[in-house]
Amino acid sequence: MVRSSDVRKTPTPGEWSQSLAPSGIGDRLHAFAAEIFPICRSITGNGVRETLSHIERIIPLERTEVATGTPVLDWAVPKEWTIRDAWIKNAAGERVVDFRACSLHVLNYSTPIRTRMSLQELKKNIFTLPEQPDLIPYRTSYYQERWGFCMTHNALQTLPEGEYEVCVDADLAPGSLSYAEHVHVGERDEEVLLQAHICHPSLANDNCSGIALLAHLAAAMHGLGTKYTYRFLFAPGTIGAITWLSRNYETSRRIKHGIVMSCVGDAGGPTYKRTWRGNSMIDRVMAHVLTHETLTANIVDFFPYGYDERQYNSPGFRLDVGLFQRSQFATFPEYHTSADNLDFIKPAHLEASMRMAAQAIEVLECDARYASTAPQGEPQLGRRGLYSAIGGDKDGYAKNMAMLWVMNMADGRHSLLDIAERAKLPFATVAGMAEALKESGLLVPA
Ligand code: ZN
């Protein structure tokens, strides 16, 4: 296992956000998304491995290959798909549909074919979006073997009757499924799972954005001392998570909190989908972070459809793993079309998403219970220099309130997150004041 354990520094409350999501990081995330955008990924095959190689330029990975046919929970690892080229040529021999121009043009996981046919016959194997006639749809056929192409409805309308030559130069054959992990070792064995799916071809928000965010978050965590161990998992959707779970039951028991990340680069949301339990620590943490960071947070209850949170929350695992997105999947018109491109995601949104992920980690890392050493009546804060310490600070009012709330609730039973929720103040403000109060001797760890 790749383990980065040469720990140097533990940020104090308020520092995590800048340590893990430094300002300006959005440009790097966007550039990375642009690097991996053209690759034709699928649930298996070289597109996945090539994507992992790009991630490895940023962080070390431990890769796993699982052979086709291997039973994984109620499933089996499928055949490996290798795509080299795909096209439709007209009578003049010109490519009227060309995989080299856009990886979405081939039905993902298409079986190979090379033949000639009439336009009428060909149309049975072409997918378009009549409602969005300028966009190429993203379509897959993983579990039913068939061939096909995807193109804009407008382009299809311009094709004259006649004979066409079609070619999907691909193999669907025994091989393996690939996934990869990066583990940041903390003080505890208890783990936080952070996962992105790596099976979508040229779609920027879903999920080049999530891959970019997680890879850079793992890189930024390098050298930081953490309480929790962080497991970054890059796996194909559904079958990848199922394969990982089938081989990691013991590890899964150590996962205390988790977040699946996808669609984190657009202007919508932010959205957080709760865990099956609905009131787990990560649910509280994400709701707190998102509502303090924006006025537009959308916190939704668990439902058994979506990304890999549904595997982790299944009854045999019941791991507290939620889903973090900007716009919720399937709710934006660009979803699963060629309009989910590099213009659709923006550095500022990627950066804000990374900052929210960093703040969630800050809460997990810094939450603690304290007991007041002067619980009877209010302690005299001025005498201890605690008011003057924050004089003239533009956040002075919030800090004063945070101090009063911490002293009021430091009964050994309430955590800093409990206090932040009750006080309706950002966690970092509350945790920062608790540090100051601890130094003054008014608080002791409970
Ligand atoms: Zn998708």
Image: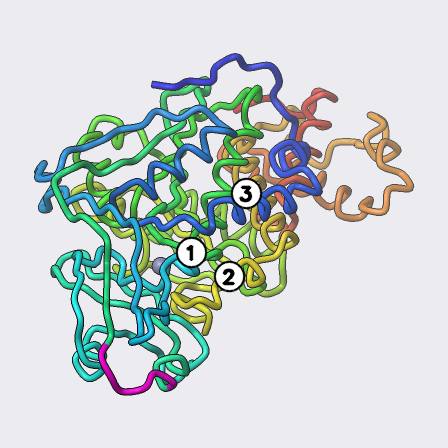
Please name the amino acid that badge 2 sits on.
Asn
Q: How is the image coloured?
A: rainbow
Q: Quadrant of ligand 1?
A: bottom left
Which circle marks residue 341 in the picture? 2
> Which x, y percent locates residue 116?
18, 71
**Which residue corresponds to mark 3?**
32
> Which x, y percent locates residue 58?
52, 29
- SS label for mark 3: helix
Which circle marks residue 237 in the picture? none
Circle 2 crowding by C-alpha within 10 Å: few under 14, some 14–19, many from 20: some
Residue occupying the far front of the picture: 92
163 displayed left or right of 34: left
167 displayed left or right of 265: left
Residue 344 visible to the viewer: yes
Q: Residue at coordinates 48% horizontally, 23% vertically from top-left?
A: 227
Report which quarter residue 23 is drawn in: top right
Q: Residue at coordinates 72% horizontally, 36% vertically from top-left?
A: 378
Magenta residues (range): 158-163
Please name the amino acid that badge 1 sits on.
Ser
Q: Residue at coordinates 24% horizontally, 48% vertically from top-left?
A: 311
300 displayed left or right of 385: left
Residue 283 sits above or below residue 222 on the image: below
| Distance from the alpha carbon under mark 1 to that under mark 3 | 13 Å
**Which residue corresponds to mark 1?**
202
Circle 1 crowding by C-alpha within 10 Å: few under 14, some 14–19, many from 20: many
Q: Per the image, is 82 magenta?
A: no
Please name the amino acid that badge 3 sits on.
Phe
